[in-house]
Amino acid sequence: TEKEIIGSQKQQLAKLFEESLKAAFPDVSDVQPLIAICNDAKHGDYQCNNAMSLWNKLKGKCTQLKGPQPVGKAIIENLPASEMIEKCSIAGPGFVNIVLARQWIAKSLQKMLIDGIETWAPKLPVKRTVVDFSSPNIAKEMHVGHLRSTIIGDTLARMLEFSNVEVLRRNHVGDWGTQFGMLIEFLFDQFPNWEADSTPAIGDLEGFYKASKQRFDSDADFKERAQKAVVSRQGGEEKYRMAWAQICEISRKEFQKVYERLGVHLEEKGESFYNPYIPKALELLNEKGLIEESEGARVIFIEGKKIPLIVVKRDGGFNYASTDLTALWYRLNEEKADWMIYVTDVGQREHFEMFFSAAKRAGWLPSNEKDYPKASHVGFGLVLGEDGKRFRTRSTEVVKLVDLLDEAKSRCKLALEERGKAKEWTAEELEQTAEAVGYGAVKYADLKNNRLTNYTFNFDQMLSDKGNTAVYLLYAHARICSIIRKSGRDIEELKKSGAIDLAHPDERMLGLHLLQFAEIVEEACTNLLPNLVCEYLYNISEDFTRFYTNCQVVGSAEETSRLLLCEATAVVMRKCFHLLDMTGNTSG
Ligand code: ARG
């Protein structure tokens, strides 16, 4: 049987207060309950902030209530009976402080242990989203920027999937630029016996790209051929289409290696996919009168922007913007998505703002940001080196993604060997753990910062077992599991027969915060901020430490209850690891 999804604590409270608001103020329509975590934990766990604005609405009208305080009081008086709330009190201008019932917190934790943490999934107002992430460019190396996009995008997708939203994970690879003319022509040059049905042995596609670029810049005859090749390719001429497909396939295999390592799944729908739809999409925009002529190009003017969005270049070709507008149209109309999320560096913000605005002008998207369907750009900052400059290796090269992952793994392996694990574990276990922890550390170090800030890439820091790091958190979780194991009690049995009691304040605090898991995920999804989950995870580990320091678990009179609280902590932490994809490559 399907287990009921309860939604977050905040959502449950909101429901109660919505009823109260309706009952207390039947004449005021459309008041959304405003529930927040209490500013001061001394006064309560949550607060309801409706009284002030309600008072402002009521003031002029005839009412017996005088001031926001009585309004707050009326809200409390009309609350339906619920075992969730222990007591409410009024503070300042009508804030309603809410203290949750200890028994209710305990019961909710117990229920979760039996029904599974999936029942805590937040309820989001969307059904199907597109997460457009990773999206490297063919024949170019995936760099740290693509790593960030891959990591952030994957986590957002996981959080949305956990929240029962259908996610279309889209790899919008750059497979349709003018650079293909040059690449194809160079391919024919380098492989005079080129065949359509066998993939040429280009080991180093990036080197191939550079060499062809050099030729393009220095050889006028080659340049001309390359430009003609673009036309042949875009015109769909078979030989050129085949050569293009081969080049893409070589790149794709390289990208796939990275995705496999990271355990990330996405579906490629590259720029080329949308190409056949561009004329139709532009025609729709044209019918709305959006497209104008400007200096030989066809453009869309955007309010507040000096430079228009070019949708057809002067040479008649399409560009990044025409593709993105068309992809948006496709996602809205063919894929019926109600939220389009794009993960790229902040440097592309302008591009997204521009074509989102164009889509609003066309009526494809509602003009109010709050309404759906919605398009959101998830920008992120730079990865910096120790010198504070953009992260690079010795030369001017960008850092290769694969090298980073290799190094994280080998450093972890070394650390594990130093701890004597090589003797304890099989070679395979060592390898797998080094990989899980190493990759997890790279991901976590990236995700824990607000994505918009630049961060410094530092192996020593991210692989440290102290502070807010993946290693620290993974160990903290392992320690909790070992407490349970060493107790010798059968935790599955305890879940059924035992009960949680949260008599000690540190127990209550831990329990309350565990219960906040759903609303943290909800907020992280709504604001597209994975760092909230990292922050939460770290705070939970701190709450646990406080609890474990002050409350004896094994051998105490409260052993059963406390072991269950340990188990609940481990379950929540594991779910966070899962959402942040820190559990290692699950695909093999
Ligand atoms: N290929 C682009 C780049 O490497 C990112 C594409 C992002 N997605 C999009 N729909 N524009 O910068």
Image: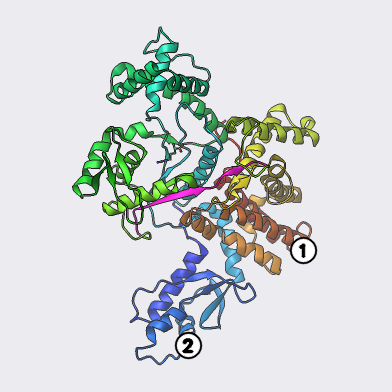
Decide: is 438 above or below 529. Answer: above
Q: Mark 2 and mark 1: span between their CA atoms? A: 41 Å
Looking at numbered disc 2 in the image, what kind of residue is underneath it?
A: Pro
Q: Position of residue 189 (x, y in %)?
A: 42, 12
Quadrant housing residue 85: bottom right
> Residue shown at 37%/59% (left/top)?
369
Mark 1 is surrounded, within 10 Å at the Cα level, by few (under 14), some (14 to 19) or many (20 or more) other residues, namely: few
Q: Residue at x 31, y 35 (%)?
A: 318
x and y percentages locating residue 502 in the rendered image: 67, 67
Residue occupying the point 66% across, 37% down: 438
Residue 270 in sight in this render: yes
Q: Nearer the viewer, mark 2 or mark 1?
A: 2
Question: Which is more toward the observer, 545 or 502?
Answer: 545
Report the residue marked by disc 1.
550
Residue that badge 2 annotates: 70
Label 2: element kind: helix
Q: As drawn, is 125 to the left or to the right of 483?
A: left
